[in-house]
Image (cartoon, rainbow, N blue to C red):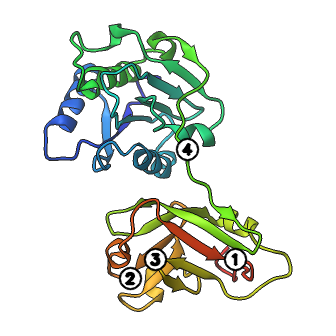
Amino acid sequence: MSKQNSLVTLTTDFGLQDEYVAVMKGVILNTCQNARIVDLCHNINPQDIFGAAYILFSAYSFFPSGTMHVVVVDPGVGSTRRIVCLKTDKYTFLAPDNGVLSLIADGEKSLSIINVTNNKYFLPEVSNTFHGRDVFAPVAGHLMNGVDINELGAEIFEIEKIETPAPVLSTNGIATAQIIYIDRFGNLITNINRGLLKSFQIDGMYGALSITVANHRIKKINQSYSEVEEGGLVALFGSAGYLEIAVNKANAKELLNVEKGDTVTINCSKYIFNEGID
């Protein structure tokens, strides 16, 4: 990575109450003084690997080519889990090898993966509890100073994956999906996107869509929250392209009393997309 590519994003579950994020930034800047640091997200739920994977996947491609994305959601810190540096045509990712890069690896091509072991690029003393400071931050700084990723360790060809739930279509045209993420507004993001929902259609059938979550039924997919009355349930495709359930000017999680992993059923046996939806 050339010195001109000095943009790095940070994604952690550290929150903003303590000093951890600022210390990571200090180490990066001590190593690479021209680094530009963007806080992607620090409010990942503690140890929520899939939540971090989803946030990263939803955001990474909107950054300029050459950006480095550093992720420290690391419940295995201090253990034998690996640290990996994954490089694509446009981006570099530095993260614990615990599945947090699963969605990136599934969606990107031309991957080069390095097992980061060369302690020449770590801080002189490495704690068992704060690899964000002692390993990830200095390694990121050295990479931005022009160190080749191959200097970090040996190439590997697989990373740890987390199982991502997939919607299932029954023979009677009912798709069973899951809530995979709940944002701070209480919106319920499911694991079904436009393309997948279209692929579930049964030729020659049309009519009204029916979505059911927590015994509440929604009869159509809207294009914005404001298309329903205040306090009303709405289904729409969110900015990341996934079907989400929301409440206009309220919190769907609290209203429906649901959690990540709960089921959403979609009766798509008689549905086709209306103009402007697909």
> Element under label 3?
loop
Query: Amino acid type of disc 3?
Result: Ala
Query: Amino acid type of disc 1?
Result: Cys
- Residue where numbered disc 3 is placed: 214
Q: Counting residues from the N terminus, which is met first, the one under dot 4 or under dot 1?
A: 4
- Residue where numbered disc 4 is placed: 163
**Disc 1 and disc 2: Cα gap in Å?**
24 Å
> For this rendering, which residue is in front, 233 or 137?
233
Q: Looking at the rendering, in which quadrant would you find the C terminus?
A: bottom right
> Element under label 4?
loop
Identify the residue at image location x=21%, y=12%: 125
Q: Residues within 10 Å of mark 2 (few under 14, many from 20)?
A: some
Identify the residue at image location x=41%, y=23%: 81
Residue occupying the far right of the picture: 204
Where 133 falls versus 208 (above or below)?
above
Query: Amino acid type of disc 4?
Result: Glu
> For this rendering, which residue is in front, 133 or 199?
199
